[in-house]
Image (spheres, rainbow, N blue to C red):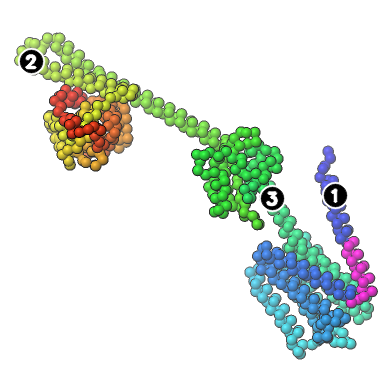
């Protein structure tokens, strides 16, 4: 098998070798050119070499200052300041050199003093840099100490009159200059030791730093040791100086420009890999146009080429629903306006093949240089939506199943109660008939009459009971089929409720229960169906009597609530458990549904009451506490029929139909 990586590695290795070979070749040409120039014209040779140093440190200053601007690091700013000081003193050294004729007449050792200060700044700054790589907490103190030393040394050298001269005409450099030079070498040796101790810290630049420092030391030592023996040393030291400038410049440019650039490229590649590996589609949109999209977005949209998407707006691919208040365009504009992340919105996206997918769109402000961009993430939630819909469908099916089972249970319970309600009066009727047929009642004429009246009363009450059950069933059937007819007339609701209440006082008294009637107003004309209202009130009173113990009380009161009339039927009976209150008006429901309950009933009375009240446009409320009592509040709207001279159409309630009361009270045994 052919390894495709081997040719690439071979090409890369050879490319690096050729690059280095080319670099060495150019340096060699420069050295030869400088030496030939020095032989022809030493002054020009010296000036060019020193200018190369000035240019080098200018480049170092620019690189360090740019690093400071990017990183906001005062350490970089300080080093760049030292570099520009070296540039300044080296430039004065050039123009004050003998033969240039610009500043050479000011003082005989000016060019030596400026050179010495530049080298002191250079060497001590290098020592400051290599010994402070850990950026300790005392960094600011170290910078202050270093700058103080440089200022004092410069002032002492230039302005202290008793300070020895560094150069004397016809004699040359003095001992103080040599001592200063050896001090510079000592600083460089200390730099070299620091570099050798911290190899891992400097990494790939360690070897280049060692060579640079070694070349600088060698250049200074050779110059001051052998300068008195041969002038050719001048050419060698200047060439070494150019080489050290080149190596130092290469290090600084690599650290301040090339290394950050490589890190930036690596970071960019890492983030690109992360973005491409994302499960969400990612868009960068600037000025309403897509500038970048990852591969996942193309997959969601059904495209294979990013060029088909770039340049368009994300809103071009969205199907807007006019019912929704927030469009994608409004959303992106709001993100740019607020310059922060906003909550996600859900939309439908049109794919290339015309199909639609459900997406969740999230936007965040994405500032870029000279641009105001927005980063959008698009998540395909089609499967989530389908799963959610399926879950909701299952929940709905389960709900319907529970309701069906509950309704089936209620119906079973209802028919069980209904069969009991039918069988009980029928058994009583059958028993009474059998007793009458037996003839035993006729043996004693006095006993015969009383027993006969008693049996007739029992048979009649159970016939009422059957009639009430049938009437309720018929009314429910009419309501379900939409044939429940309401006969509205205007009536005085106060007198009507009072008359109905008074008509059952005797029945309540038979069970030793007191009924109390109270009203806030004496008259209120409303539109109602008197027959249906009578059934409602009788049913509520029947329930109150049924579930109130002897010596108890029933309070019937009426309150005027301006827009409604509130009719309250309150008892001191057994009350209703809290867990039964919500179902008290449900059809076929009873608080006690057992077959051995203390009171009879089919469980459809209160459901029919609620239907009749709502047919009047009103509502019914129940309040109850076990063993304290219950209160049913009927609220009817205050309104009358729209007829001329309505006062002539008011119907008074005068019910002498004792049969209705007997029917409603048929399941109460006195």
Q: Is residue 97 above or below residue 623?
A: below
Compare residues 400 and 441 and report the one nearer the observer: 400
Snapshot quadrant of residue 630: top left
Look at the numbered disc 1 and give the secondary structure of its residue. helix
Indicate yes or no whether the magenta region holds residue 14.
Answer: no
Q: Is residue 118 above or below residue 170?
A: above
Q: Which badge, 3 or 2, comes first in the chain's sequence?
A: 3
Q: CA distance from mark 3 to mark 1?
A: 25 Å
> Where residue 495 sits in the image (x, y, percent)?
16, 34
Q: Is residue 19 left or right of residue 434?
A: right
**Would you name the residue on which mark 2 appears?**
449
Q: CA distance from mark 2 to mark 1?
A: 132 Å
Snapshot quadrant of residue 133: bottom right
> Where residue 77 sits in the image (x, y, percent)?
69, 69
Crowding near pointer 3: few (<14 within 10 Å), some, many (20+)?
Answer: few
* Count of number-bearing discs: 3
Q: Which badge, 2 or 1, comes first in the chain's sequence?
A: 1
> Where residue 346 sits in the image (x, y, percent)?
54, 41
Look at the numbered disc 2 and give the secondary structure of its residue. helix
**Do residues under tags 3 and 2 come within 8 Å of each other at their CB atoms?**
no
Compare residues 631 and 565 and report the one nearer the observer: 565
Residue at position x 56%, y 50% in the image: 333
Compare residues 624 and 349 and report the one nearer the observer: 349
Q: Is residue 604 above or below residue 86?
A: above
Q: CA distance from mark 3 to mark 2?
A: 110 Å
Residue at position x 31%, y 26% in the image: 588
**Span of residues in magenta:** 25-43
**Would you name the residue on which mark 3 appears?**
270
Would you say the magenta stretch is mainly helix, strand or loop?
helix
**Would you name the residue on which mark 1 appears?**
11
Q: Is residue 162 left or right of residue 502?
A: right
């Amino acid at each position: 098998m052919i390894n495709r990586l081997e040719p690439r590695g071979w090409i890369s290795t050879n490319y690096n070798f050729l690059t280095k070979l080319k670099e060495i070749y150019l340096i060699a040409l420069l050295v030869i050119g400088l030496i030939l120039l020095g032989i022809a014209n030493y002054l020009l040779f010296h000036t060019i070499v020193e200018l190369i140093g000035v240019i080098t440190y200018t480049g170092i200053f620019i690189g360090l200052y740019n690093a400071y601007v990017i990183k906001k690091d005062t350490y970089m700013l300080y080093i760049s300041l030292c570099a520009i000081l070296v540039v300044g003193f080296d430039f004065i050294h050039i123009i004050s050199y003998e033969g240039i004729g610009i500043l050479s007449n000011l003082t005989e050792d000016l060019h030596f003093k400026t050179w010495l200060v530049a080298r002191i700044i250079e060497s001590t700054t290098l020592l400051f840099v290599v010994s402070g790589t850990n950026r300790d907490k005392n960094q600011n103190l170290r910078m202050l100490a270093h700058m103080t030393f440089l200022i004092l040394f410069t002032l002492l050298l230039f302005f202290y009159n008793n300070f020895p001269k560094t150069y004397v005409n016809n004699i040359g450099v003095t001992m103080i200059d040599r001592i200063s030079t050896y001090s510079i070498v000592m600083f460089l040796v200390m730099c070299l030791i620091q570099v050798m101790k911290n190899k891992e810290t400097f990494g790939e630049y360690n070897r280049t730093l060692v060579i640079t420092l070694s070349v600088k030391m060698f250049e200074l030592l050779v110059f001051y040791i052998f300068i008195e023996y041969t002038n050719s040393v001048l050419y060698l030291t200047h060439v070494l100086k150019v080489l050290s400038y080149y190596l130092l410049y290469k290090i600084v440019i690599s650290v301040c420009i090339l290394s950050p650039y490589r890190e930036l490229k690596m970071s960019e590649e890492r983030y690109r890999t992360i973005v491409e590996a994302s499960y969400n589609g990612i868009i960068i949109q600037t000025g309403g146009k897509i500038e970048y999209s990852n591969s996942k977005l193309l997959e969601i949209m059904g495209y294979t080429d990013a060029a088909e998407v770039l340049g368009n707006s994300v809103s071009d691919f969205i199907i807007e629903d006019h019912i929704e208040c927030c469009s994608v365009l409004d959303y992106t504009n709001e993100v740019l306006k607020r310059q922060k992340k906003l909550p996600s919105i859900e939309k439908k996206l049109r794919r290339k093949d015309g199909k639609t997918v459900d997406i969740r769109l999230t936007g965040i402000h994405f500032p870029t240089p000279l641009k105001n961009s927005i980063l959008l993430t698009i998540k395909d939630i089609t499967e989530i939506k389908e799963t959610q819909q399926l879950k909701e469908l299952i929940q709905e099916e389960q709900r319907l199943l529970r309701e069906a089972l509950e309704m089936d249970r209620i119906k079973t319970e209802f028919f069980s109660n209904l069969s009991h309600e039918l069988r009980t009066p029928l058994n009583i009727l059958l028993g009474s008939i059998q007793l009458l047929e037996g003839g035993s009642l006729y043996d004693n004429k006095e006993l015969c009459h009383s027993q006969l009246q008693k049996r007739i009363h029992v048979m009649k009450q159970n016939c009422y009971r059957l009639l009430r059950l049938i009437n309720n069933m018929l009314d429910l059937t009419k309501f379900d089929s939409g044939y429940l007819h309401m006969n509205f007339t205007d009536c005085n609701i106060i007198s009507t409720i009072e008359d109905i209440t008074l008509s059952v006082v005797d029945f309540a008294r038979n069970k030793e229960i007191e009924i109390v009637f109270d009203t806030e107003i004496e008259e209120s004309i409303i539109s109602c169906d008197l027959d249906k209202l009578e059934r409602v009130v009788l049913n509520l009173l029947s329930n109150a009597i049924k579930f109130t113990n002897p010596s108890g009380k029933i309070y019937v009161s009426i309150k005027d609530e301006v827009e409604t009339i509130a009719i309250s039927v309150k008892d001191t009976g057994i009350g209703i458990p809290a867990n039964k209150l919500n179902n008290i008006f449900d059809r076929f429901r009873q608080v006690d549904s057992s077959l051995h309950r203390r009171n009879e009933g089919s469980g459809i009375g209160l459901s029919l009451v609620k239907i009749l009240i709502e047919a009047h446009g009103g509502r019914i409320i129940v309040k109850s506490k076990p063993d304290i009592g219950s209160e049913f509040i009927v609220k009817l709207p205050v309104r009358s029929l729209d007829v001329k001279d309505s006062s002539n159409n008011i119907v008074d309630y005068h019910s002498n139909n004792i049969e209705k009361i007997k029917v409603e009270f048929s399941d109460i045994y006195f």
